[in-house]
Amino acid sequence: MAIRVRFAPSPTGLPHVGVIRTAIFDWLLARHYHGQFILRIEDTDRSRYVEGAVEEIIGALKWLGMDIDEGPGQIGGDHGPYFQSKRLSLYHRYADYLVESGKAYWCDCSAERLDELRASQEAAKQDIRYDNLCRELALEGSPGDGKHVLRFKIPEGGTTTFHDELRGDITVENATLDDLVLIKRDGFPTYHFACCIDDHHMAISHVLRGEEWIPSAPKHQLIYEAIGAEPPKFVHVPVILGPDKKKLSKRHGATNVLEYKNMGYLPEALFNFLALIGWNPGDDEEILPREELVEKFSVERINTSAGVFDIEKLDWMNGAYIRAMDTGELTSRLKPFMAEWGWIDGNWEPWGEDYVESVVELMKERMNRLTELREKAGFFFEDFDGFDPADVKKSFRGDDILSRLRMVRDALANCDFSLTALESAVRGTADALEVGAGKIIHPVRLAASGVTAGPGLFEMLELLGKDRVLARIDKAIAWVEAQ
Ligand code: GLU
């Protein structure tokens, strides 16, 4: 069987983490079986359409490295168009067929009538459902006539069973199902109708979608039967929860995948992280680069219980990807951030690519997010004024601080700034003053970098270079003198 998996977002907002996690499962399944990954835009709800959402969704897929085999615009494919809004005539043909075969009917119940019906059902604590008033009236209508909706005739009595790949057969009483709308007053299909027709016409083999669609699946089963089509395999994937076990929402932090880009996460890491929410490879391994995920992915290992979005784990994982990445590559990923912070221009000036790369090499052990570099490595690119009082208390402590700073300044002035020379200048000063090395190392670090934590001191001094280090120590001496 050809494996064809579609990702079918509605362009109603930004690319949500949960939606993109489903897309990752879709993509992994397609790639695992050398099948097709199809993007279909479900834009039939015109009132919820958000301008720019399609571009954002495609941008998120692209950023995460998910290539699309068939989809809108330039991508193409034999089963288009890939916007549902451009497939209306297909849905209307099926609408005609269902009316002619007595499986659907036109309904002209007004919104007011349906509101009243709902209110009375609510008051009587009954299930909210259409009361089938128009079912036997044989009203004349046509798609988009502005007066009628088309409703599906749910069979009276009996049960409907659909198969979920993770949960097995699920059976419901038909009496619990509503005569659902297939075509709305504006002539656009509902999600239920359009997705069944499209999944059939696009020869989709597997439908992976959020478990909130389980209650709709029996209706879809009935629609497939009514149009004489074989349903695809259904896989309902679990929701993503925040650490407090509530459904992931803005309260927990960013929900738009592209925000993670701005926050300094690598797409490789976010992809790996999201793939492990609600799925696991069956062992304890967590760092699974894309190729390994493709190799190991299987629908059977998707969980039926909810997964948790743990940002601390994402930070850890991102750090692991940063450390494993080639420094040159990492530097080019950091380039846009550094340009935004005003450290470099598009040509790495004024520092030059080699210098920037050396900074990254020194710092890559010390960051989990790309954006952390701004705080941690700013002193490599910018001068600073003054010191944090807490840092002063820690590193410029003791009455003899000025003499220690002056001594080490002289020693550094007389050294060639090779790593060994720097080390002996610093340690030699400590020995000469008969103090512990820390009494020299900590003040020099604070004077040269403006902060108390950072990379190895000697590597840092070497990279800053003699002129800057001496100038900064002079400035620190003047600052301490002025206190
Ligand atoms: N357009 C639906 C949504 O965004 C897709 C559900 C499905 O994949 O069938 O929820």
Image: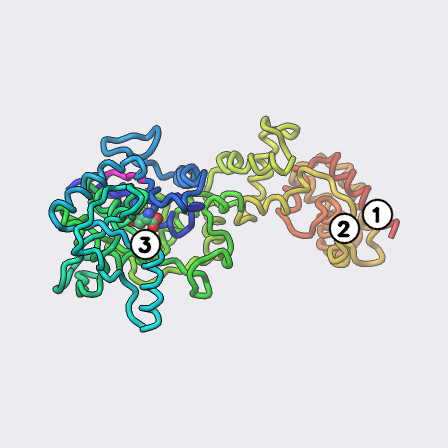
User: At 46% from the left edge and 53% from the top edge, which residue is drawn?
Assistant: 314
Give the distance between the C-alpha atoms of the residues marked 1 and 3, in whole angstroms. 79 Å
The amino acid beneath tag 1 is Trp
Residue bearing the label numbered 3: 110
Residue 275 on image: x %, y %: 36, 51
**Contact? badges 1 and 2 (CB < 8 Å):** yes
Q: Secondary structure at mark 2?
A: loop
* Disc on res. 442: none
Label 3 neighbourhood size at 10 Å, few (<14), some (14-19), many (20+)? few
Residue bearing the label numbered 1: 479
User: At 52% from the left edge and 34% from the top edge, which residue is drawn?
Assistant: 332
Give the distance between the C-alpha atoms of the residues marked 3 and 2, in whole angstroms. 71 Å
In this view, 388 is above or below 323: below
The amino acid beneath tag 2 is Phe
Magenta range is 36-40
Majority secondary structure of magenta residues: strand
